Image (cartoon, rainbow, N blue to C red):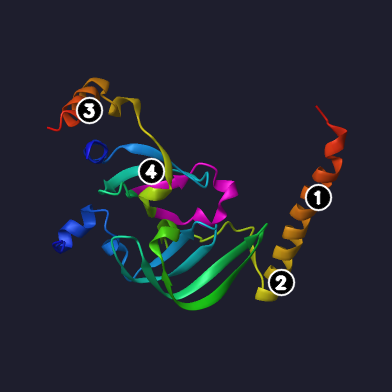
Amino acid sequence: MLFFSYFKDLVGREVTVELKNDLAIRGTLHSVDQYLNIKLENTRVVDQDKYPHMLSVRNCFIRGSVVRYVQLPPEGVDIELLHDATRREARGG
Amino acid sequence: MSWAGPDDVLFSTSLASYLDKKLLVLLRDGRKLMGILRSFDQFANVVLQDACDRVIVGELYCDIPLGLYVIRGENVVLIGELDLDKEELPPNMTRVSEAEIKRAQKAERDATDLKGSMRKRMEFLDFD
């Protein structure tokens, strides 16, 4: 649940999602669910020339199972908070 | 599971906000299907009406009509809402017939096969 809650806090931020097929998409995080499926808004593909079919996609749903990385804005990462949350979760609380 | 109300849908990750819209579905094998979303579930199994397969080879493309498709969720990579006001593809791309795109696809496949076999034959040269 930790990463689900963590991603929920990042809603509204600009993130880059890199998929297992190497497609990287940048956009505003609209929502996340328990499977870490992601919805992005105002998306643009990082390597647009290679993926012409993505030109008119503005909003998209990405299946959690195909995500390789999510690149976050540095200010979206509070290491202290994550650290504490991890310990709390490990204790089962 | 409870049903989401009309407002919840807009803020959730549910595909409900894409219902009855024209979508682009990217599959794990690289295929690009386009169609109107008529149904879905929590696994991202989806039903597409008037589905078509968009084949792109270089600057040529073709939409091959498929009919009604049920796609198993595990094959779905991405579901994109198509902005109907925007150009769907870059202006330099030309639409061709199904026969022509199949020919272009085959030519592309043959070229990559040839490249692969050439490399294999040259392996003994050891370029390093």
Quadrant for the N terminus of chain B in the image: bottom left
Is B81 in the magenta? no
Tell me the subunit letter for badge 4.
Answer: A
Residue at mark 1: B117
Image mark for residue A27: 4
Which residue is pictured at 30% across the width and 61% down the height? Answer: B15
Indicate the secondary structure of the residue bearing disc 2. Answer: helix
Quadrant for the C terminus of chain B in the image: top right
Residue B85 appears in view: no
CB under 8 Å between discs 3 and 2: no
Q: CA distance from mark 3 to mark 2?
A: 56 Å
Residue at mark 3: A86
First in sequence: mark 4 vs mark 3: 4
Kind of residue indicated by mark 2:
Glu
Image mark for residue B100: 2
Q: CA distance from mark 4 to mark 2?
A: 36 Å
Q: Which residues are magenta?
A: A40-58
Q: CA distance from mark 1 to mark 2?
A: 26 Å
Image vertical order of residue B113 relative to residue B40, above or below: above
Which residue is pictured at 66% across the width and 71% down the height? Answer: B96
Image mark for residue B2: none
> In the image, which is nearer the foreground, mark 3 or mark 2?
3
Image vertical order of residue B122 relative to residue B75, above or below: above
